[in-house]
């Protein structure tokens, strides 16, 4: 119930105005977001890389409504990738991109515009010597995102995709994308989805995650285990052993600000541990999805609201 309400609020302009104007929000947002400008992102990335973690940077933004804004987002990624190249951080940092931020939902030629902008970002990543992963948004975008990914992978075979275990289709998608060289980030899924397309309860989603992970780990690709769940992390380690995978043939991923000690533990054991690091001014949707995931995050936020005077 609470999760549904928060996810609905993440799409509400009215709630957005209230949350954004509420001063303590910003202190809480800082826990999950590196800052609002490129320099903040580079500094936070540098700090993470210095502790043996890798990074994937997200220039925050989604549901872009006009072509100029979509092109502006692609340009922001080009600047970011140039900065990663110049600072020598590209060896430890890649970027994550939401296709809706680069035009996927535009009413005229949305997919074509998103493909062109994503191509620009991939070219900049290739020039910097790093990679790109396409984030996955709600289920209405899955076919379109995977179609764009297939096109881009013809020229940029290292392009990563995200598959969401809560979707009933995902086990089959994992089979398609488990071939040699294929980089797949497996997450549980963060959007409000109908029962017709997605498993609803935590137990069902966890079981679906394990089934999908089994396919990826047995395949020839590069699985990226994006979860904070101790059970999923343990099972991933076991599956890696059973499939004779070396530590450089898969990686763990977590969100910035979540379970940092566990991130360091996994990295300290010699695993690749990548932190998803968002930055920029469009933090609202991202922040609300984080609140929806974990009641403790919400309690923290509500306590700040209650004590603001
Ligand atoms: C790198 C990365 C990229 C992602 N990209 C996408 C994407 O493209 N599309 C998408 O839909 N979703 C994405 N997500 C979000 C994802 O789908 C989940 O919503 C989110 O990761 C929460 O699921 P979970 O696997 O951590 O498990 P949950 O079921 O949320 O949590 C399980 C357990 O993990 C532990 N845990 C979780 N959070 C915390 C915390 N804050 N502190 C301490 N322990 C905690 C607790 O033990 C908890 O019981 C991404 C997640 C990551 C890590």
Image (cartoon, rainbow, N blue to C red):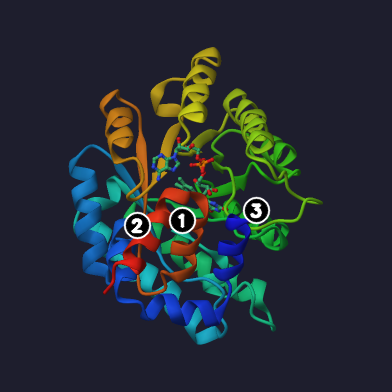
| Nearer-the-camera pick, 219 or 274 | 274
Q: Earlier in the sequence, mark 1 or mark 2?
A: 2
- The reply, left or right, for residue 239 in relation to residue 123 is right
Image point (58%, 55%), residue name: 3
Q: Where does the image place residue 195, in percent across and percent down from the top left? A: 78, 50
- The reply, left or right, for residue 11 in relation to residue 168 is left
| Nearer-the-camera pick, 98 or 283 | 283
Q: Which residue is tagged 2?
A: 32
Q: Quadrant of the N terminus?
A: bottom right
Q: Earlier in the sequence, mark 1 or mark 3?
A: 3
Q: Is residue 254 visible?
A: yes
Whether residues under marks 1 and 3 lie with C-beta atoms below 8 angstroms apart, the answer is no
Whether residues under marks 1 and 2 lie with C-beta atoms below 8 angstroms apart, the answer is yes
- The reply, left or right, for residue 143 in relation to residue 210 is right
Q: Which residue is tagged 3?
A: 150
Dot 1: few (<14), some (14–19), or many (≥20) neighbours within 10 Å?
Answer: some
- Whether 217 is drawn above or below 259: the answer is above
Q: Which residue is tagged 1?
A: 290
Image point (45%, 28%), residue name: 249
């Amino acid at each position: 119930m609470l999760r549904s309400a928060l996810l609905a609020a993440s799409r509400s302009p009215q709630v957005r105005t209230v949350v954004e104007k509420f001063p303590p929000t910003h202190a809480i947002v800082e826990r999950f977001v590196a800052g609002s400008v490129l320099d903040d992102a580079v500094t936070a990335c540098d700090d993470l890389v210095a502790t043996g973690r890798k990074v994937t940077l997200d220039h925050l933004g989604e549901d872009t409504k006009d072509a100029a804004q979509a092109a502006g987002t692609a340009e922001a990624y080009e600047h970011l990738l140039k900065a990663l190249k110049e600072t020598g951080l590209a060896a430890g940092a890649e970027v994550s991109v939401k296709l809706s931020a680069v035009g996927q939902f535009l009413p005229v030629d949305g997919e074509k515009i998103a493909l062109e902008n994503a191509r620009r970002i991939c070219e900049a990543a290739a020039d910097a010597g790093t990679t790109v992963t396409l984030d996955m948004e709600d289920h209405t975008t899955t076919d379109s995102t995977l179609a764009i990914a297939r096109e881009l992978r013809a020229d940029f075979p290292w392009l990563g995709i995200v598959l969401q275990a809560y979707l009933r289709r995902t086990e089959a998608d994992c089979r398609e994308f488990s071939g040699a060289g294929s980089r797949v980030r497996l997450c549980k899924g963060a959007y409000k989805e109908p029962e017709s397309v997605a498993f609803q309860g935590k137990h069902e989603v966890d079981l679906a995650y394990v089934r999908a992970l089994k396919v990826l780990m047995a395949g020839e690709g590069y699985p990226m285990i994006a979860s904070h769940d101790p059970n999923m992390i343990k099972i991933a380690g076991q599956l890696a052993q059973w499939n004779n995978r070396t530590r450089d043939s898969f990686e763990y991923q977590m969100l910035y600000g979540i379970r940092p000690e566990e991130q360091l533990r996994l990295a300290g054991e010699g695993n690749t541990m990548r932190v998803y690091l968002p930055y920029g001014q469009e933090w609202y949707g991202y922040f609300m999805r984080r609140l929806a995931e974990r009641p403790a995050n919400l309690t923290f936020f509500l306590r700040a609201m209650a004590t603001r005077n």
